[in-house]
Image (spheres, rainbow, N blue to C red):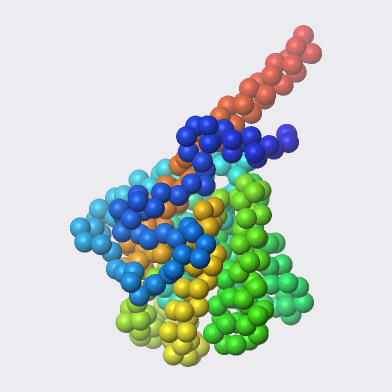
Amino acid sequence: MALDVRRIFAFARRAGRAPWSSDLERRKRVGVVTFDKNGEKVNLGAISESPPGGVTREEAARELGELGEELFELQDLLWGARTHSVLVVLQGRDTAGKDGAIKNVVGLLNPRGVHVTSFGVPTEEEREHDFLWRIHRQTPRRGEFSIFNRSHYEDVLVVRVHDLVPREVWGERFGHIRDFEELLCEHGTIVLKFFLHISKDEQKKRLLEREEDPRTAWKLNPGDWQEREKWNEYTEAYEDAISRTATKRAPWTIVPADTKWYRNLVIARELVQTLRPYRRVWQNKLDEIGKERKAELDAYRARKT
């Protein structure tokens, strides 16, 4: 069946909630800062890496369980309706918790419809293409989730901090990224971008803990300490990248990441609150498909009689 994305979006708007609309005041009430305006000034130093007061681990665990159930239901509707897909971008410094978020939040989903990609140093083949080539190949099909552990943003972060390409090259990439993400949105992809915001002291603590724990010692890398020496340079690069690529349809959420259980809760909340407005759109699509399937079955039975 041919998909008319514009019709689906128009239906959502008539229902009073555009699928990609953001609600900054709601997000602020839960201690989260979201950027959805291109060019808006970003000051990470003014944003807390810790949970707001009044949130307990026990309450967070209970809420995460409830969110997990709803997220699973929403994923099932997404899978059946096949009108949209979901792209989750996880960015953050070393030890910020990208793997932990994937384990504890993405783990709430049905693995049938989830694809996780970790982007490392580009291969020789990837370097022979434009910087978005390897990224586009991993974007989600309709009905599915794609989770990016690091992403195309490395090409305006690492290359900038380490002066791997000229300024005019990485500077032009912000526009390419905005256009790329807009293209995905036009195709029905729901884009959520998370920056896992960790403090310098917490990062040091986690790096030292890795050395002491045999279960995590395999993660040890001198490069983590070397990158730490460029903390301020990365802060500036992240602030610039977030400011220059934040849009209504592909916003950035700054996740306080010093406390792991709160980090997981924030990401799960944002996922559910972003996808929840689509529930009626997807359910209506499934109802429509169900009627068509029943008509086909009735026609088949009529031919048999």
| Image position of 37 with respect to 7: above or below | below
Q: Position of residue 28 (x, y in %)?
A: 33, 55
Give the residue at x 30% y 53%: 29
Give the residue at x 54% y 67%: 244
Q: Can residue 100 be seen here?
A: no
Q: Judge by depth and name the residue closer to the eye, 100 or 19.
A: 19
Q: Judge by depth and name the residue closer to the eye, 126 or 23.
A: 23
Q: Residue furthest top?
A: 305
Q: Position of residue 26 (x, y in %)?
A: 35, 49
The image quarter containing residue 93 is: bottom left
Give the residue at x 38% y 61%: 33
Q: Position of residue 153 (x, y in %)?
A: 57, 71
Judged left or right of residue 21, residue 140 is right
In the picture, the quarter occupied by the C terminus is: top right
Judged left or right of residue 86, residue 40 is left
Give the residue at x 52% y 71%: 241
Q: Can residue 235 be seen here?
A: yes
| Image position of 5 with respect to 110: above or below | above
Q: Judge by depth and name the residue closer to the eye, 1 or 182.
A: 182
